[in-house]
Image: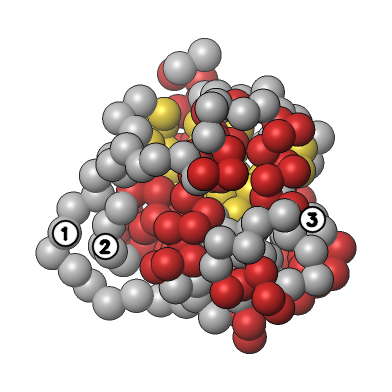
């Protein structure tokens, strides 16, 4: 899904507040229970238009967890995050670091496709919040890489523009290093930003080494 630009804000990035886990996944569920809960979720209106949910893919004990915005049309059809041209670019970005889909874990903020690839609404994000938080708990990554404005602002609970959030490491929940870069769909539209995205990836690699 494409990530659009945002307006400047005076708020600073902060660790996300503690939220209750969604009712369907209460009791610290494991992967099977969590995936089943997501597949049957009807907590928001996005469930009405989906072909299928897009849970996540990759190594469930990965050092790197990559978080995007939400499924697009192809992801909704195939049930896998980051496929199509944006997914191919993400694969290339990972390959430049010696990584691939089998060595990282990839998930989205929301698990169902917003119609027309629009931004998820606050109530849709809230409905999925417990799912993503539990995925992060289960993976226990050494680093989170947020792709694009929406994922970055959601994870950090801020509305600071992505351009101001880039270039330094943040902390998710006060403990997991979080690095922000541009969404691959944005890089396809703005290839002149690829050099900056590479700088972000090198920063992420540095953070991983520091916490190894």
Instruction: Assess disc 2: are there few (<14), some (14-19) or many (≥20) residues with their C-alpha within 10 Å of its C-alpha.
Output: many
Instruction: Pick whichever, 104 or 79, lies toward us.
Output: 79
**Which of the two discs, 1 and 2, labels the residue nearer the N terminus?**
1
Q: Secondary structure at mark 3?
A: loop
Find out whether the residues at labels 1 and 2 contact each other: C-beta distance under 8 Å. Answer: yes
In this rendering, the count of numbered labels is 3
Residue 168 percent coordinates (x, y): 33, 42
Which numbered disc covers residue 11?
1
Find out whether the residues at labels 3 and 1 contact each other: C-beta distance under 8 Å. Answer: no
Q: Residue at x 79, y 55 (%)?
A: 80
The residue identified by callout 2 is: 160
Q: Secondary structure at mark 1?
A: loop
Which numbered disc covers residue 80?
3
Residue 32 visible: yes
Which of the image's four quarters has the N terminus? Answer: bottom right
In the rendered image of this protein, does residue 7 appear above or below residue 203? below
Instruction: Assess disc 3: are there few (<14), some (14-19) or many (≥20) residues with their C-alpha within 10 Å of its C-alpha.
Output: many
Residue 153 percent coordinates (x, y): 37, 58
Distance (Cα) linking label 1 and label 2: 6 Å
Q: Residue at x 50, y 45 (%)?
A: 22
Residue 198 visible: no
Q: Residue at the right extreme?
A: 78
**Which of the two discs, 3 and 1, labels the residue nearer the N terminus?**
1
Q: Residue at the top extreme?
A: 212
Q: Residue at x 28, y 64 (%)?
A: 159
Distance (Cα) linking label 3 and label 1: 33 Å
Q: Secondary structure at mark 2?
A: loop
In the rendered image of this protein, does residue 125 appear above or below residue 198? below
């Amino acid at each position: 899904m494409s990530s659009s630009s945002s307006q400047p804000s005076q708020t600073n990035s902060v660790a996300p507040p503690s939220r209750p886990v969604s009712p369907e996944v209460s009791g610290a569920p494991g992967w099977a229970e969590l995936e089943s809960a997501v597949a049957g979720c009807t907590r928001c209106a996005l469930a009405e238009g989906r072909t299928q949910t897009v849970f996540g893919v990759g190594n469930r004990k990965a050092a790197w967890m990559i978080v995007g915005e939400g499924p697009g049309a192809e992801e909704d059809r195939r049930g896998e995050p980051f496929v199509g041209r944006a997914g191919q670019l993400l694969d290339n970005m990972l390959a430049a670091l010696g990584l691939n889909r089998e060595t990282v874990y990839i998930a989205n903020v929301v698990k169902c496709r917003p119609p027309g690839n629009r931004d998820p609404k606050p109530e849709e994000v809230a409905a999925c919040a417990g799912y993503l938080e539990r995925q992060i708990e289960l993976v226990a990554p050494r680093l989170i890489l947020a792709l694009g404005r929406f994922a970055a602002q959601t994870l950090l609970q801020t509305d600071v523009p992505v351009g101001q959030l880039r270039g330094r490491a943040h902390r998710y929940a006060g403990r997991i290093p979080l690095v922000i870069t541009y969404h691959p769909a944005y890089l396809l539209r703005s290839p002149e930003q690829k050099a900056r995205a590479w700088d972000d990836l090198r920063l992420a690699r540095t953070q991983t080494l520091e916490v190894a």
